[in-house]
Image: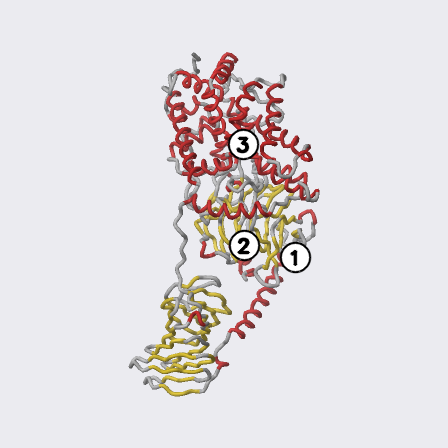
Amino acid sequence: MYAPQNAGELKLESPEIDEFEQLVFDWEDGQLDDVGINRLRQLLRQSSDLRQRYVQRQVFAALVQMDRDAGLTTSSDEKVGCDSVLPVALANDSILEQEKPDLRPGKSPTLVRQDSRGLGQRLKRHQGILLVAAASIMLCFVLGRWLVVESRLKQAGSNQSAEANERSGKQEATSAGVALVTRLVDVTWHESAKNFMVGDAVPAGMVSLDSGVAQIEFFCGATVILEGPAQLWLESSSMARLQSGRLRAQVPPAARGFQIQVDELKVVDLGTEFGIAVNQGQAEVHVFDGEVELHQTNGEQRSLMAGTAVKRAEDGALKVADLNSNDFLGLERLNERVRSQKQSRYESWLAHSGELRKDPRVIVYYSMESDRAWTRKLTSSAVPVNRDLDAAVVGAKRVVGRWPQKSAIEFKRPGDRVRLDIPGQYGSLTFACWVKIDSLDRWYNSLFLTDSYQRGEPHWQILDTGQLFFSVRQGLERGKAHHKVLSPQFWNPSMSGRWLHIATTYDVEAKTTTHFLNGEALCEERIPDDLLVKQTRFGKATIGNWSSPTRPEADFAIRNLNGSMDEFVLFHGALTHREVKELYEQGRP
Amino acid sequence: MAGMSDQEQTEVFVQLLAESQGRLFGYVYSMLGDHARAMDVVQETNLVLWRKKAEFRAGAAFMPWAVAIARFQVLAHVRDQSRERCLLDSELVAALSEETEKQVDKLDSMRVALRQCLDNLPTEKLEMIQLRYYRSMSIAEIAQVVGSQSTAVKVALLRLRRSLAECMHHRMLES
């Protein structure tokens, strides 16, 4: 029987298996001599059970290494927030410090070594290189173009989301609310009241405007246009209480029974359009279309038909009033106001974008403004013009951006991506983009990733937990590979479909990384000296994705963003908080 | 790939090739047990597949064809006298190939399952996997790090591998 390097029986099922495992361990550690190799071969020839055992062992080792190479190593240190300290190093790190990976090119690996670190050195040579990615990227160059097979990918798309749900065993996402804010024009929210953005779900409670107009769609189907100053208390998805101000409600048949209360007066809609104004104890109800019922506290009910209006005096008496439709802003006029607001926002962004492209700190800038719908190129917007910085759109579609006048790029299928090549070396960096996230389906959802992940190369992505994730590769050692900076959770499914401004600064002078959302810092973290990389670089890189699309099951190899991007800019130098805020303010839809 | 333009054929081919990379690596690695060599052989295999792409016909299964070529590349690698000795000789490569192909066929779903199983592993067990497979430490080094005997490390690794294999099996049955 074979005498292993470190004697001691493993007490396995049989002496034969024991010997076999001992041999394989020594072989893996590069400690098996010719005698040992011959013995191991002999065992494999003799026993089909051992052959099977060997294959399972090897396939397992291959799997774990592929997992490592895919960079998906969840460990206790992985999912921490921005404020947390550095990952807890594994015990006794100093042992590993003595090992220097052998990176000499062309040096043939040796299998039998006296050196106990044989396997280690051979493996380290390829750390940081993504084997699956590497091969496909090579092919990508061969073809110059990456196209995907639609049917496979459709299939992939559906399988992955199902898997993602199954994997995490997370609770079903919920979103509290009785209505949605669908449009806002020149709104100033009341000081102490809650602020809402377009797309926000409104929970039961007070909506209070000092000025401007808000369009609120109740989940029952009724649409309310509220003109400030106004205070509307949302009771449920089919009932609200107007305390002051003016509103116009449109109630399609499906939402019949929608109620607005004014003090003790209940206005029950029977499928129609009406307006209510409340001012200093006086209330007016105007019916533009259909019919409403007025319920009074004394039990009296009264029907109001289209074209009629009533006024309720402070004493509660109801009197007929003159109908005045123009006093209540309707959907049509609101539309015009929205359109003109969008036009002016768009124009203001356009002017700002014109300045931005001249900023000498810009490395690449894609305004996604001037491109034609059919071009598969993303024109670099920076001046002086450098056509080498134009990016290639692969798979991804052109869609409407923040404004109807402007386009964006939509990443949907696992192959969708934008390819670019950025030469040169830099120091501090700032990434910023406008992004609309439909969902976070992948463990890693790419914003910007360099093809490889070598020293000085940054990776910018979003985790499925809704956290922004930024790192710059430092070294090869696992514990010292990079300093990961994770923001607190900034995204959840209720924000799906909303345009967000995301930025991250990497400041090598201040030694900090800062994440921003909509112009506000999410978190700032200091980079420890030993993980700070002063020289950054990119080379070939991808926006919205990473390595190649693979089979449906292999969802970790896919990092495509599920959403759209409208404007991407990369600066050398760290922008100040104020400058990031400015980017947001000037680009907000 | 009849009925398709040259460009479409190429696209389909590249797609298939890209999708096969994980399984090819799994196969070649299982045969050679060495990351760097396996990388080299997979790249050689890719080149051969690319050169022979005209031989690949629509409707034919891509994977068996690709694995057959990978097997030739492994054999060539093993036979090459100028190289240092591999554990498996050509006879053993032939003897193990079928079983390996069977295993590798499930590789993509195994990867998903493994990820799930690793996610649920207690920290100290995950560290063991990391030391061995991510940091590529030898048994003696791991023993030193965790302050234990080499034999205990081996036993722990074997148990861990078995429980992960069971977990993966279970996961794969579920899905």
**Which residue is label 3 attached to?**
A127
Mark 1 or 3 closer to N-term? 3
Q: Is residue B51 above or below residue A193?
A: above
Q: Quadrant of residue A282?
A: bottom left
Residue depicted at 49% across the width and 54% down the height: A517
Q: Say what amino acid the circle numbered 1 marks.
A: Ala
For the residues beneath circles 2 and 3, the answer to whether they share a chain is yes
Residues at marks 1 and 2, common chain?
A: yes
Residue A193 lies left or right of residue B111; in this view the side is left
Q: Chain of mark 1?
A: A
Give the residue at x 32% y 85%.
A315
Mark 1 and 3 residues: CB-CB less than 8 Å, in contact? no
Q: Which residue is mark 1?
A: A373
For label 2, the SS is: strand
From the top left corner, tell me how far across and down residue A60 is, in percent. 47, 29
Q: Earlier in the sequence, mark 1 or mark 2?
A: 1
In-front residue for pair A61/A100: A61
Residue A69 pos. (x, y %): 52, 34
In this picture, is A252 found above or below B100? Answer: below
